[in-house]
Amino acid sequence: MSFKENLIKLRKEHGYSARSFAHKLNIPYTTYLAYEKTDREPKYSLLIKIADIFNSSIDDLLGHENISFVTPKKTMIG
């Protein structure tokens, strides 16, 4: 799911209206609506605050799934 889909889902699951959640984040309601209705994403500091409120990770909020880290192979030179 996309960030905006996750945001709406989590907001509703936690019982917030869009207006009350904007107030909790201390941002204008219109700014918050842009996060839900467009591809606009908040600054990192606000993402952290949202993740903390929902007890979620930023990766989950942004819709990153199956993130894996690849360890580079060592090569011998010579």
Image: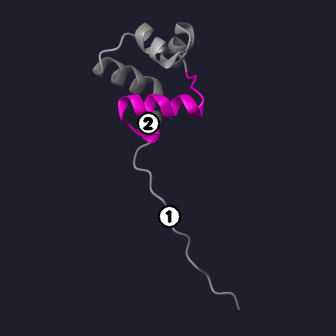
- Residue 15 colored in magenta in the image: no
Among the 4 quarters of the image, the one containing residue 76 = bottom right
Q: Image quadrant for the C terminus? A: bottom right
Q: Secondary structure at mark 2?
A: loop
Residue 45 lies in magenta, yes or no?
Answer: yes
Badges 1 and 2: C-beta atoms under 8 Å apart?
Answer: no
Measured as percent of width and height from the top left, residue 39 is found at 55, 23
Relative height, residue 10 to residue 34 (above, below): below
Left or right of 76? Residue 12 is left
Does residue 33 appear in this view? yes
The numbered dot on residue 63 is: 2
Q: Quadrant of residue 42?
A: top right
Number of other residues with Cα within 10 Å of mark 1, as a class: few under 14, some 14 to 19, many 20 or more: few
- Helix, strand, or loop for circle 1? loop
Q: Front-most of 72 and 60?
A: 60
Name the image quarter holding the N terminus.
Answer: top left
Amino acid type for the residue under numbered disc 2:
Gly
The answer to whether 71 is drawn above or below residue 63 in the figure is: below
Residue at the image position 42 percent from the left and 33 percent from the top:
52
Few, some or many residues within 10 Å of mark 2 (<14, 14–19, 20+): some
Question: Looking at the image, can residue 1 be seen?
Answer: no
**Is the image coloured rainbow, by chain, by secondary structure, or in one colour?**
one colour
Q: Residue at x 45, y 56 (%)?
A: 68
Looking at the rendered structure, the kind of residue marked 1 is Val
Q: Residue at x 41, y 44 (%)?
A: 65
Q: Position of residue 4 (x, y in %)?
A: 46, 23
Q: Spatial distance from mark 1 to mark 2, Cα to Cα?
A: 20 Å
Chain part drawn in magenta: 39-60
Q: Earlier in the sequence, mark 1 or mark 2?
A: 2
Question: Which residue is situated farthest in the right direction here?
Answer: 78
Which residue in the protein does label 1 denote?
70
Residue ID at (36%, 35%): 55
